Image (cartoon, helix red, strand yellow):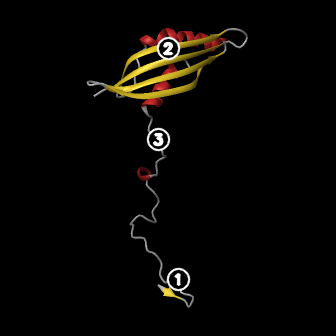
Amino acid sequence: MLYDDTRTCTAAFDLETKSADAGAPASPSRRARRYRPRRTVSDRVREALLMLANGRADLLTHEEKAWNSITFSGTRHEVMLDFNGAEAVTAGEDFIAELPEHEFRIPGQLVADATISEVDHRFGTGERMVVTAVLLLLEES
């Protein structure tokens, strides 16, 4: 390092890169990968419910609570879905009928119970149905 008379440091050398492939282009197997966040259990629950609703519902809320017992641990999910319009309400009625018997495929989880806890159905020109579904998931071990 060299110092001038105002006592500031000026570099008298260049930094050298010791990496063998510093100047070489990246090979196809060593390309930088895009960051993809890992999907959580909550993400998978929402996706499964929206697929069961045939894409006709909008997610209003999703609450998740962890729970444990002596033999099991898992999560309780309460999801509110909005079915807006006559066609969407028909899909919502199908959703209500199919939910309790639906076979969910969520990796590492077993859906122990799936129920409808509340339905708010409004008729008229702007027909709308808000459905609250509750799912109880157990962690597979």
Tell me: 119 left or right of 39: right
Amino acid residing under circle 3: Pro
Q: Nearer the viewer, mark 2 or mark 3?
A: 2
Q: Which residue is mark 3?
A: 37
* Depth order, front residue of 23/130: 130
Give whichever of discs 2 and 3 has the lower sequence position.
3
Q: Nearer the viewer, residue 73 or 15?
A: 73
Q: Position of residue 113 (x, y in %)?
A: 39, 16
Residue drawn at x 46%, y 19% is 134
| Residue 28 position (above or below residue 21) | above
| Left or right: where 99 falls relative to 127 | left
Q: Residue at x 60, y 10 (%)?
A: 90
Three-letter amino acid code at disc 1?
Answer: Thr
Reading the chain from its start, which is encountered first: label 2 or label 1?
1
Tell me the quadrant of the picture where the C terminus can be found: top left
| Mark 2 element type | strand
Q: Amino acid at mark 2?
A: Ser
Query: Which residue is denoted by mark 1 in the rendering?
Result: 10
Task: Please tell me which of labels 1 and 3 falls first in the chain.
Answer: 1
> Under tag 3, what secondary structure?
loop
**Outermost residue, left side:** 71
| Residue 120 x/y as whole percent | 60, 13
Instruction: Check the image and name the residue furthest to the bottom.
Output: 5
* Mark 3 neighbour class, 10 Å CA radius: few under 14, some 14 to 19, many 20 or more: few
Residue 72 x %, y %: 29, 24
Query: Cα distance, mark 2 to mark 3?
Result: 32 Å
Quarter where residue 75 is shown: top left
The residue located at (39%, 67%) in the rendering is 19
Query: What numbered label is drawn on residue 117?
Result: 2
